[in-house]
Image (tube, helix red, strand yellow):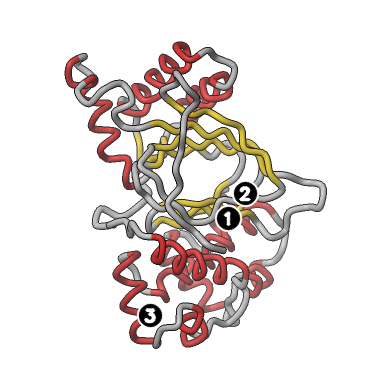
């Protein structure tokens, strides 16, 4: 799947793009664009990739993605035949109201939010998340002026709320088509074969690289080793299975790519700070 810079064009006379995305599976691969993006997931689940962050997503997931930050949503492979994926996406340029609008109107807190959004931002508080969700659900039916006001209100809520960043502080986006295409191949291969044993030479071969060149390349682009990435992805898959199924911990370990239960418990604890059994009980 070829990935490239995506050009987003608003309708004449509009300052932002607000649309509903309804597909069998989300089709946008790893991509980036200069516009910021608010994405609210209404239906479907899977893995969300924002910069160097890899997390599960499910209905209600809400993320603010900054300019030129690589991102994509990879659906769960176990979706039912009659299911579909649904999201509302709002995209806008950081200067959609003018370069100095926020400074001139005493809204430096929103300007700061926009500048920091390159790492990807989520709201910590569930009540605040629901409030923003309600506003996004209504935005599609609003006229241009009301859409703009609604977006400003949403950004104001984000900037004054308890938030957490997704990507690491040192993450630097790879802003070219070749890098996005390469990383998309790696992400999709790993996620589609999560319960398999990975041969790094095979992964490197996908990119026509040697093992050492691939290891260096991956670390430079993601600020983590390929082994760290694999463990995070596998543990993320295990967390989903622990919350959504009644399968035994041994079964979940195997389905997440671990042949040793002790190793699974060790890796799970190192990332989640709970043993799998406690995580299931709590969540």
Quadrant of the image containing the N terminus:
bottom right
Marks 1 and 3, the one that precedes in the sequence? 1
Q: CA distance from mark 3 to mark 2?
A: 28 Å
Left or right of 242 in this view: 118:
left
Residue 56, how many percent across, how many down? 54, 52
The quadrant in which residue 104 appears is top left
Residue 190, how many percent across, how many down? 55, 71
Q: Nearer the viewer, residue 121 or 176?
A: 176
State the residue position of label 2.
Answer: 26
Q: Are marks 3 and 2 in contact (CB under 8 Å)?
A: no
Marks 3 and 2, the one that precedes in the sequence? 2
Dot 1: what SS?
strand
Picture residue at 26% right of the left edge, 22% below the top? 98
Dot in front, 1 or 2: 2
For label 1, the crowd category at 10 Å Cα-Cα, with few meaning under 14, some 14 to 19 and many 20 or more, is many
Establish if 104 lies above or below 274. Answer: above
Dot 2: what SS?
loop
Residue at the far right in the pictured view: 82
Picture residue at 61% right of the left edge, 32% below the top? 20
Residue at the far front in the pictured view: 12
Establish if 216 lies above or below 63. Answer: below
Dot 3: what SS?
helix
Left or right of 266 in this view: 250:
right
Q: Are marks 1 and 2 in contact (CB under 8 Å)?
A: yes
State the residue position of label 1.
Answer: 74
State the residue position of label 3.
Answer: 214
Q: Nearer the viewer, residue 85 or 282?
A: 85
Marks 1 and 2, the one that precedes in the sequence? 2
């Amino acid at each position: 799947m070829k990935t490239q810079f995506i050009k987003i064009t608003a309708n004449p006379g509009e300052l932002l793009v607000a649309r509903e995305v309804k597909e069998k599976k989300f089709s946008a691969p790893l991509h980036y664009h200069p516009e910021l993006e608010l994405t609210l997931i209404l239906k479907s689940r899977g893995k969300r990739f924002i910069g160097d962050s890899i997390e599960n997503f499910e209905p209600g997931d809400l993320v603010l993605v900054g300019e030129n930050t690589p991102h994509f949503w990879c659906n769960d492979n176990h979706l039912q035949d009659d299911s579909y994926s649904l999201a509302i996406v709002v995209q806008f340029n950081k200067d959609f109201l003018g370069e100095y609008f926020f400074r001139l109107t005493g809204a430096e807190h929103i300007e700061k939010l926009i500048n920091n959004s390159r790492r990807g931002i989520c709201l910590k508080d569930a009540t605040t998340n629901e409030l923003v969700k309600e506003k996004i659900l209504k935005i599609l039916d609003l006229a241009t002026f009301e859409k703009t006001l609604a977006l400003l209100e949403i950004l104001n809520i984000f900037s004054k709320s308890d938030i957490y960043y997704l990507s690491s502080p040192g993450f630097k986006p790879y802003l070219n088509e070749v890098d996005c295409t390469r990383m998309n191949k790696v992400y999709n291969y790993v996620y589609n074969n999560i319960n398999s044993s990975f041969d790094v030479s095979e992964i490197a071969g996908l990119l026509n690289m040697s093992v050492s060149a691939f290891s260096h390349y991956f670390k430079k682009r993601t600020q983590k080793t390929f082994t760290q990435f694999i463990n995070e992805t596998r543990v993320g898959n295990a967390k989903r299975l622990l919350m959504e199924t009644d399968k035994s911990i041994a079964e979940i370990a195997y389905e997440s790519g671990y042949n040793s239960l002790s190793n699974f418990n060790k890796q799970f604890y190192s990332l989640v700070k709970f043993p799998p059994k406690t995580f299931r009980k709590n969540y």
